[in-house]
Image (cartoon, rainbow, N blue to C red):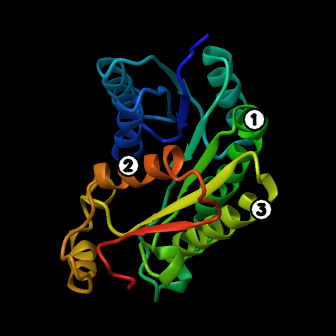
């Protein structure tokens, strides 16, 4: 059993999740790396954790399915003896113009809400007894889309608005033992947006700092909320270069 703190980061094969996993390792945490499809990428994330001097477990699970999420948490806690930080980073979207309402089929809505909202709740519920036992914390990855109603599609914005509200509700429900916060990034330069640079450029035109975030910058906010902000709960930390100021 590990004597170090333990972090579970969903969707940590690439992007923000990978950056958070590596930063937790740099802060001395053992890290559970989760993926659903990208095993090769997830193995690279896990190797990056080991190279930073801590231990890791690689667990394949669909973060939108309750049973798989419960198994993910069980494997994490069995491997390391407990859990100190849960980061709900796994998410999905469909890129649909906000004016194209007919493209928003039931399948589009269901796929986004299942992972982004239900999956976040499932993970919080499954992890809660373990986090309470160690006075841990949760950080949900929301988005400024959930504040401004912008982003890749209306269902995505709605899902991230729900994550913001869920964060506030769970912060009240799980206090005082467990803190629950969220980070709300603006555009982040990951492969999600690689084919949508026009959206990034439009957003940057309205952003005072004139650039998107890097995954490392969002990871800094995540680990700060999880590990340092000990009197902070129910809060949404916006990291968007001043766009929603």
Q: Residues within 10 Å of mark 3 (few under 14, many from 20)?
A: some
Q: Secondary structure at mark 2?
A: helix
- Is 3 situated above or below 114? above
* Spatial separation of the CA atoms under disc 1 and disc 2: 27 Å
Quadrant housing residue 67: top right
What secondary structure is found at the residue carrying circle 1?
helix
Q: Nearer the viewer, residue 23 or 164?
A: 23
C-alpha separation, residue under disc 3 versus residue under disc 1: 25 Å
Q: Nearer the viewer, residue 205 or 20?
A: 20
Which mark, residue 67?
A: 1
Q: Is residue 96 left or right of residue 106?
A: left
Q: Earlier in the sequence, mark 3 or mark 1?
A: 1
Q: Can you say which quadrant of the picture contains the N terminus?
A: top right
Q: Is residue 149 above or below residue 28?
A: below
Percent across and percent down for residue 45 are 35, 29
Residue in view at x 32 percent, y 79 percent: 242
Mark-to-mark CA distance, 2 and 3: 24 Å
**Which quarter of the rendered picture does the C terminus lie within?**
bottom left
Crowdedness near tag 2: few (<14), some (14–19) or many (≥20) residues, C-alpha within 10 Å: many
Residue occupying image coordinates x 44% and y 46%: 223
In the image, residue 170 lies at what x, y percent? 74, 58
Q: Nearer the viewer, mark 2 or mark 3?
A: 3
Total residue callouts: 3
Picture residue at 61% right of the left edge, 17% below the top: 80
Tell me, yes or no, whether the two marked residues, 2 and 3, touch with CB atoms within 8 Å.
no
| Dot 2 or dot 3, earlier in sequence | 3
Q: Depth-wise, is mark 3 or mark 1 nearer the camera?
A: 3
Callout 1–callout 2 Cβ contact below 8 Å: no
Is there a contact, CB below 8 Å, between mark 3 and mark 1? no
Name the residue carrying label 3. Answer: 172
> Circle 2 sits on which residue?
219
């Amino acid at each position: 059993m590990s004597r170090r703190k333990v972090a579970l980061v969903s969707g940590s094969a690439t992007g923000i999740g990978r950056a958070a996993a590596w930063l937790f390792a740099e802060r001395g945490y053992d890290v559970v790396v989760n993926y659903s499809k990208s095993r090769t990428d997830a193995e690279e994330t896990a190797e990056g954790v080991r190279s930073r001097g801590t231990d890791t477990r690689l667990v394949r699970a669909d973060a939108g399915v309750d049973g798989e999420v419960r198994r993910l948490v069980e494997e994490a806690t069995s491997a390391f003896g407990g859990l100190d930080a849960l980061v709900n980073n796994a998410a999905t979207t469909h890129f649909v113009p906000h004016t194209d309402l007919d493209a928003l089929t039931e399948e589009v809505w269901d796929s986004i809400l299942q992972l982004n909202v239900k999956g976040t709740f499932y993970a919080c519920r499954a992890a809660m007894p373990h986090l309470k036992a160690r006075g841990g914390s949760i950080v949900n990855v929301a988005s400024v889309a959930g504040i401004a109603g912008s982003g890749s599609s209306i269902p995505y914005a709605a899902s991230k608005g729900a994550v913001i509200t869920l964060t506030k509700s769970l912060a009240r429900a799980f206090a005082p033992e467990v803190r629950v916060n969220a980070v709300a990034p603006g555009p982040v330069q990951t492969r999600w947006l690689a084919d949508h640079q026009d959206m990034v450029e439009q957003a940057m035109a309205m952003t005072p700092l004139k650039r998107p975030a890097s995954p490392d910058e969002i990871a800094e906010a995540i680990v700060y909320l999880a590990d340092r902000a000990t009197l902070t709960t129910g809060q949404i930390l916006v990291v968007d270069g001043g766009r929603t100021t």
